[in-house]
């Protein structure tokens, strides 16, 4: 936690382009944006990702994501918004302090989302069963 760059940003020890702050959350411009206005929303208390964040911090973050999305879309005159969150290294998480990306999108901006493939025969029902088994 001592070396966490987002904790340092929240504490004001590292500079950032802050766009919003309240008691629980802090939002600032991503330094390497997909598009201008790309914003990160973080809880002020350190948590690593979706798996260890407390319900209250997560609720606070996601409420701010909702309201800031509309603000950012208007401010940047974007044509849409992507909400993205990477959890763990192999899902693309680089900074180990929970953050949600708000990404303004523009017609023809060329940013590619994930590729998709159809399920093979029987695969969907198998994974559905595995997920439901974890719920019971
Ligand atoms: P992720 O891959 O989801 O962990 O994303 C981390 C994001 O943090 C990247 O998009 C970086 O550009 C961004 N980032 C890293 N350091 C800083 C910083 N000091 N200020 C603002 N954004 C940062
Ligand atoms: Zn942190």
Image (cartoon, helix red, strand yellow):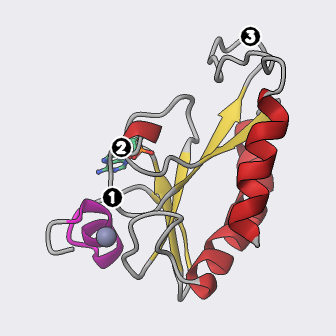
**Tag 3 near tag 2, CB within 8 Å:** no
Q: Position of residue 43 (x, y in %)?
A: 49, 74
Q: Which residue is mark 2?
A: 89
Q: Is residue 123 left or right of residue 42?
A: right
- Whether 64 is among the magenta residues is no
Q: Which residue is mark 1?
A: 96
**Is residue 129 visible in this depiction of the protein?**
yes
Q: Is residue 125 above or below residue 24?
A: above
Question: Looking at the image, is mark 1 or mark 3 earlier in the sequence?
Answer: 1
The quadrant where ligand 1 appears is top left
Q: Is residue 3 left or right of residue 90?
A: left
The region drawn magenta spans: 4-14
Q: Is residue 22 above or below residue 35?
A: below
Give the secondary structure at mark 2: helix
Q: Position of residue 61 (x, y in %)?
A: 62, 71
* Numbered mark located on residue 108 in the image: 3
Question: Looking at the image, is mark 1 or mark 2 earlier in the sequence?
Answer: 2
- Whether 11 is among the magenta residues is yes
Name the quadrant containing residue 59: bottom right
Q: Name the image quarter holding the N terminus.
A: bottom left
Q: Nearer the viewer, mark 3 or mark 2?
A: 2
Q: Viewer-proximal residue, 125 or 100? A: 125
Q: Name the image quarter holding the C terminus.
A: bottom right
Q: Position of residue 72 (x, y in %)?
A: 70, 49
């Amino acid at each position: 936690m001592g070396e966490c760059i987002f904790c340092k940003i929240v504490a004001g020890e590292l500079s950032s382009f802050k766009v919003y702050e309240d008691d629980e959350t802090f939002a600032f411009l991503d330094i390497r944006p997909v598009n201008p206005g790309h914003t990160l929303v973080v809880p002020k208390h350190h948590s690593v990702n979706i798996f260890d964040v407390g319900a209250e911090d997560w609720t606070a973050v996601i409420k701010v994501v909702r309201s800031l999305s509309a603000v950012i879309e208007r401010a940047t005159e974007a044509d849409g918004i992507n909400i993205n969150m990477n959890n763990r290294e192999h899902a693309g998480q680089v900074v180990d302090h929970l953050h949600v990306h708000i990404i303004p999108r523009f017609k023809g901006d060329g940013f590619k989302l994930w590729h998709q493939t159809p399920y093979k025969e029987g695969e969907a029902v198998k994974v559905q069963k595995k997920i439901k088994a974890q719920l019971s």
